[in-house]
């Protein structure tokens, strides 16, 4: 979770507007079985809009802006998002199921292989694909993924993010580059952080949604259980408080989640890969882990809207990042 944004939500001026885009053939390649019980009007549109791209380009920031809630964790460090996280936006006559995914990369260890699987699935089940890049990128961090995207027949948006950091010339030059690489794509500059062009993007997405029944009940915000968000909040605090490889060696497992009338009692374990990492995470006299615990508890209380008692442990789970059985249990492989 991130701090509430203090920046103004007003779009910066002087940048090219999102072009009015020609209609594209629509595809409904998802089964729609779950929706028989949900009421919906005739002409209802629904679809999976999947967000992919290199690490750190702003995918999660964009997803949260589109969903209007902070459901995906955002951090300056790369590889913050490990799972595929869905965010659902509902209107009476449409439903968008967004998926945020981990950044594309060449996997160096098993955990990253699992992360790339979420990306692969996201390419397969998308009705609309959003490729996020930023003003600094030429190509993406995993070109084989781009080659796949370039061949896709569904509507593809290539969004050049962080245009607030560069002038209009750079944005235009980047747009031309991507247009050359994928002529069928809808290319547009955005600033997810400052909400520039995000509303226009939403309108273009809705226009391209296939005719379909809703996939989820209309009051659902996400497919993920509460425990998932608890572990994500703790993980975000770890990303904030530790340097270098430590955050990438930690997994947070919620062992207990008890909902009592006035308080949530939560027991969570931070699993590290090695003994030496445990010392760093705990810190001298337990100072570091205390900080992580306090920050997490505060954020959990605001997220859950109730008092939280958080019991946080650190445990060595030897080499968990390369252990397929453990990764399965943590939800990275089927
Ligand atoms: P992800 O790894 O692609 O999901 O990227 P994140 O959404 O976690 O963002 C990575 C970093 O880029 C964070 O520090 C964001 O605040 C920052 N960021 C995202 N969008 C923008 C933007 O439009 N402008 C600027 N200046 N920074 C951004
Ligand atoms: Mg992310």
Image (cartoon, rainbow, N blue to C red):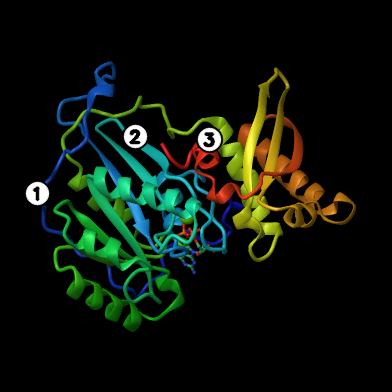
**Which of the two labelled residues, at mark 3 and mark 1, occupies the earlier sequence position?**
1
Q: Where residue 296 appears, x then y in whole percent? A: 70, 44
Read off the residue under disc 3: 329
Task: Identify whether 58 is placed above or below 92.
Answer: below
Kindly identify which numbered label has been placed on residue 90.
2
Mark 1 Cβ inside 8 Å of ligand 1: no
Read off the residue under disc 1: 25
**Which of the two labelled residues, at mark 2 and mark 3, occupies the earlier sequence position?**
2
* Quadrant occupied by the C terminus: top left
| Mark 1 crowdedness (10 Å alpha carbons): few <14, some 14-19, many ≥20 | few
Q: Between residues 202 and 321, which one lies in front from this camera angle? A: 321
**Which of the two labelled residues, at mark 2 and mark 1, occupies the earlier sequence position?**
1
Q: Between residues 300 and 55, which one lies in front from this camera angle? A: 55
Task: Identify whether 318 is placed above or below 36.
Answer: below
Q: Residue at x 24, y 72 (%)?
A: 178
Cα–Cα span, label 2 and label 3: 31 Å
Nearer the camera: disc 2 or disc 3:
3
Q: Where residue 29 appears, x then y in whole percent? A: 18, 38
Q: Between residues 64 and 292, which one lies in front from this camera angle? A: 292
């Amino acid at each position: 979770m991130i701090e509430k944004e203090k920046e103004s939500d007003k779009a910066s001026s002087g940048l090219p507007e999102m072009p009015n885009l020609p209609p594209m053939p629509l595809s409904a390649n998802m089964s729609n079985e779950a929706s028989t019980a949900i009421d919906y009007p005739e002409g209802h549109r629904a679809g999976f809009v999947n967000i992919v791209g290199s690490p750190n380009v702003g995918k999660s920031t964009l997803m949260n802006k589109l969903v209007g809630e902070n459901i995906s964790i955002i951090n300056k460090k790369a590889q913050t998002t490990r799972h595929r996280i869905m965010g659902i936006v509902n209107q009476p006559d449409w439903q968008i199921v967004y998926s945020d995914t981990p950044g594309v990369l060449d996997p160096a260890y098993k955990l990253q292989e699992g992360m790339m699987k979420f990306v692969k699935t996201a390419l397969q089940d998308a009705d609309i694909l959003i490729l996020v890049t930023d003003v600094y990128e030429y190509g993406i961090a995993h070109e084989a993924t781009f080659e796949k995207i370039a061949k896709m027949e569904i509507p593809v948006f290539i969004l050049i993010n962080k245009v607030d950091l560069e002038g209009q010339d750079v944005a235009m030059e980047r747009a031309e580059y991507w247009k050359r690489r994928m002529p069928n794509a809808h290319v547009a500059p955005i600033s997810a952080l400052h909400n520039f062009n995000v509303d226009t993007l939403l309108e273009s997405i809705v226009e391209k949604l296939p005719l379909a029944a809703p996939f989820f009940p209309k009051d659902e915000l996400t497919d993920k259980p509460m425990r998932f968000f608890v572990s994500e909040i703790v993980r975000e605090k770890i990303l904030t408080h530790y340097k270098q490889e430590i955050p990438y060696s930690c997994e947070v497992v919620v062992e207990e989640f008890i909902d009592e009338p006035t308080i949530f009692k939560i027991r969570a374990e931070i699993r590290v890969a090695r003994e030496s990492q445990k010392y760093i995470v705990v810190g001298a006299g337990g100072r570091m882990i205390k900080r992580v615990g306090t920050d997490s508890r505060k954020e959990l209380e605001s997220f859950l809207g109730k008092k939280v008692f958080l019991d946080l442990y650190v445990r060595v789970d030897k080499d968990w990042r390369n252990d397929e059985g453990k990764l399965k249990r943590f939800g990275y492989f089927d």
